[in-house]
Image (tube, rainbow, N blue to C red):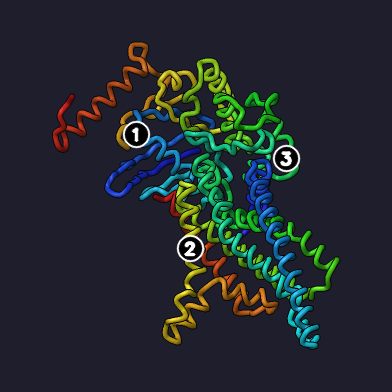
Amino acid sequence: MINVFSIWTIAKRELKSLFVSPVAYVVLGLFAFGTGYYFTFSMQRFDALLRDAQLQARMMQNPDMLNYINLNSFLINNVTSFTFMLLLFCAPFFCMRLFTEERINSTYELLMTSPISVTEIVLGKFVAASLFLLVVLATHSIFLAVMFGFGNPEIGPVVASYLGLFLAGMSFLAIGLFASSITKYQIIAVIVAMAINLGLLMISWGAENAFENLSLFLNKAAITSHFENFNQGVIYISSTVYFLSLIALFLSMGQIAVRSFSRS
Amino acid sequence: MIEAISIEKTYGLFQALKNLSFKVEKGQIVGFLGPNGAGKTTTMRILAGFYPPSSGEAIIDSYSVTRQPEEVKKRIGYLPETPPLYPEMTVESFLKFILELKKVSKALRKDRLGWALEKCGLKDRRKSVISTLSKGFRQRVGLAQAVIHQPSVIILDEPTVGLDPLQIMEIRDLIQSFRGDHTVLLSTHILSEVTATCERAIIINAGHIVHEQALKDMSEKKSLEEIFLEVISKDSFESNSGGQSLSVA
């Protein structure tokens, strides 16, 4: 039986430790700076693009040309795509200490001899990491406030983009959690998680020259294609299932790794 | 009550524990003695439910460690060799976390926290961050996490290792104060520790029990040191001559 209170006990401690150590602030700061810089730069590019299009439309006397240029697909989607890549590279670093630290502090022995199950420990840590991801994504509210304040992007696609970002981010966290559960060295955890993340990214690259069925498989196996579905403003059931299965797969592998560590 | 019934533990080809059986009655303090690598930590980890034995059974308060782990885990307090601490937390927040982790009911938590801080001499340090504490204080926090939920069985793996003489005295007094209410099993390779705190000593060597000694009916002639050295060297000699011959340096 899974006890919600036990999960919350673990998650709460994890978050507390995170916010008293510099890790959380460094990650948040870098993330806000990185995406902020990219947002500003994208906005300038969007501005240039818009002027260009206005000029062309006037010259060709075809105002319909301007319909293609909108905030959603030319600005917000760029920012979310960039954030997706940033998450892919940052999540391994953020997750590396989740279990490795327990082994170093020998608190692992404390957890394993306490009335709490391995599933609850893994879920607790995952909940904490996901809540932190929410905080990270919340820094984007500034950009969204600017865009909704000065422009009028469609809200639906924005919600879909951010839902996709959250699901993809949770998948990266589950992968990072798994990687940190199989080793006591943080650097190995980072390398393993990064390898899996990049694998999920690059798997579609071979699709172009592959046979029909293989090509389809490679495309569907890549995390990017599912994120793109969300980013284009469509919530596909299949893509949602893809992310949820990825999370379930890596959390259960992490659970097996945590359990088997004490038995060796 | 702690009972080990023919526990065996193998790591690959290495047999760490061989047919280990012993019993610690309720309210007793028993010392677990042996040279380094004798299997003390392995035994304690099995009793605490950290990993299962390869065969045999461990019983804590009439619950089986392998078959009813949840019941057992509620009833034990365990201090591993290195105290399990989150260095970035304060003493108080760490102990509050332990209370939640050990499923102590909300109504009792405040009392238990005060009790543990008082008992382990941590009252003045409750707001200190654990990473800033000295080794002695960390050991006390380790002890506090093992006893805060007032478990019926307390398992301590080398609780005084690396402490100065004064700290050792304090920890000993603390352990003594659990006599009667709690069953305590403590491991050490410091013999005077056992004579000072325990009713009984169990001496193990190379994964099996070589001697059990009640300390109150120990003869005046032989000290625990002498008994220890005698049984260990006898056991080592027997196992060597019984199997392949090893050259003695």
The one nearer the camera, B170 or B25, is B170
The residue wearing badge 3 is B108
Q: How many residues crowd around disc 1 within 10 Å: few (fewer than 14), some, or many (20 or more)?
A: few
Amino acid under disc 3 = Leu
The one nearer the camera, B48 or A52, is A52
Q: Do tag 2 and tag 1 residues touch (Cβ < 8 Å)?
A: no
Total numbered labels placed on residues in the image: 3
Chain-order first, disc 1 or disc 3: 1
Q: Name the residue located 77 percent from the left edge and 73 percent from the top edge.
A: A51
Q: Secondary structure at mark 3?
A: helix
B83 to the left or right of A124:
left
The Cα atoms of the two marked residues, 2 and 3, are separated by 46 Å
A154 to the left or right of B148:
right
Amino acid under disc 2 = Ile
The residue wearing badge 2 is A196
Question: Which marked residue is nearer to the observer: mark 2 or mark 1?
Answer: 2
- B135 over B83 or under it: above or below: above
Q: In this view, which residue lies farthest toward the right?
A: A149
Q: Do tag 2 and tag 3 residues touch (Cβ < 8 Å)?
A: no
Q: Name the residue located 48 percent from the left edge and 69 percent from the top edge.
A: A202
Q: Do tag 1 and tag 3 residues touch (Cβ < 8 Å)?
A: no
The one nearer the camera, B206 or A103, is A103
Could you confirm whether marks 2 and 1 are on the same chain? Answer: no
Q: Secondary structure at mark 1?
A: loop
Residue B61 percent location from the top left of the image: 52, 42
Q: Name the residue located 30 percent from the left edge and 49 percent from the top edge.
A: B12
Residue A42 percent location from the top left of the image: 70, 65
Snapshot quadrant of residue B227: top left
Amino acid under disc 1 = Gly
The residue wearing badge 1 is B37
The Cα atoms of the two marked residues, 1 and 3, are separated by 40 Å
